[in-house]
Image: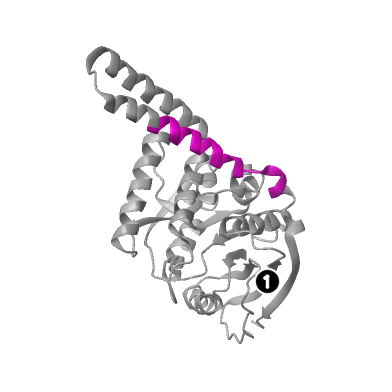
Amino acid sequence: MKKFKILIPCYNDWQSLFKLLNNIDNNITMFDAEFTVLIVNDCSTEKMPKPSFSFKKIKSIDLINIKKNQGHTRCNATGIKYLSEKKNFDYMILMDGDGEDNPDDLPLIIKNILENKNISVVATRKKRSEGLLFTILYNLHKIITLIFTGKNMNFGHYCCLTRNDVILLSSKKTLWSNFAGSAKKFIPNLSGVPTIRGLRYFGPSKMALTGLIIHSMSIIASFKYQVLFRSLLFIFLFSFLYLKIYDDNIFLILNFLIGFFCTAIFFISKRERLSELENCQQRIKNIENIHTTRL
């Protein structure tokens, strides 16, 4: 029997998390596999309500409590590093805890990876459910990423990885700064399942605009040397056009913006810290079991 470990980061959003867990359980009943959940509690300031679950399929839930708030991405990295050392699973499913990673898509994702046992699966986004501004910014991020890295980033955190790929990512310093960029860069084969981004179960998103910009740049920073190479090509091209063909200051402005962008990407890449990733379990306060189902 195959073993699935579902990894979910959480910060205060207990109401959404508990609803998500029930929806997950309802969507995995048809599979002859073992499902357990690992929640990474990012030092929540709101006390977790006493859980009262009645699951049909989820076998157990463990809660990793982090000593100090470290952010969504580093919670993912901590959970992945922890699982890579335990190795008590065949596949890891990574999901956000707010409902935007729609659990209704789990059957397609799980079926895909069971049919292609050695190929990890990502939930590609064929449609988003956010507002117009976010959609515009997201598409701008995709265009910039494609121009400067050559990569089509059409997925986020929602995925199902093989144990070997989890172990592979756990040794890469970019994981401490960004998950999606790390997966795109280091996992050689990724299968995609088209999904529609869900809506948050409760309340507004906790990520501000600055956080979204840093998140976007962190993805691009995973490919910083491709960014440097392409930036130099653009600067050379625009300089040639300015000197030889069009005496227009727009090319000087473009060169300045490209140089600034490339510098910013290298600055953001300093968030990639292998030493902190390797020692991230020192940030764990304790691990507790909050539910076990007698199946």
Relative to residue 58, is residue 64 drawn left or right?
right
Kind of element beneath mark 1: strand
Q: Nearer the viewer, residue 244 or 199?
A: 244
Which residue lies at the image location 51% right of the left edge and 45% below the top edge? 218
Q: Which residues are magenta?
A: 257-277
For the N terminus, give its image quadrant: bottom right
Magenta span: helix, strand or loop, mainly? helix
Residue 188 vertical placement versus 288 (above, below): above
Kindly identify the amino acid type of the residue bearing the numbered disc 1: Leu
Residue 122 vertical placement versus 40 (above, below): above
Residue lying farthest to the front in this orientation:
249
- The part of the image, by quadrant, that contains residue 150 is top left
Mark 1, residue position: 63
Q: Nearer the viewer, residue 285 or 242?
A: 242
For the C terminus, give its image quadrant: bottom right
Q: Is residue 198 magenta?
A: no
Which residue lies at the image location 51% right of the left edge and 65% below the top edge? 96
x and y, in percent, of residue 278 in the image: 72, 48
x and y, in percent, of residue 33 in the image: 58, 69
- The part of the image, by quadrant, that contains residue 81 is bottom right
Q: Residues within 10 Å of mark 1 (few under 14, many from 20)?
A: some
Q: Is residue 263 magenta?
A: yes
Q: Nearer the viewer, residue 54 or 208?
A: 208
x and y, in percent, of residue 133 in the image: 31, 58
- The part of the image, by quadrant, that contains residue 253 is top left
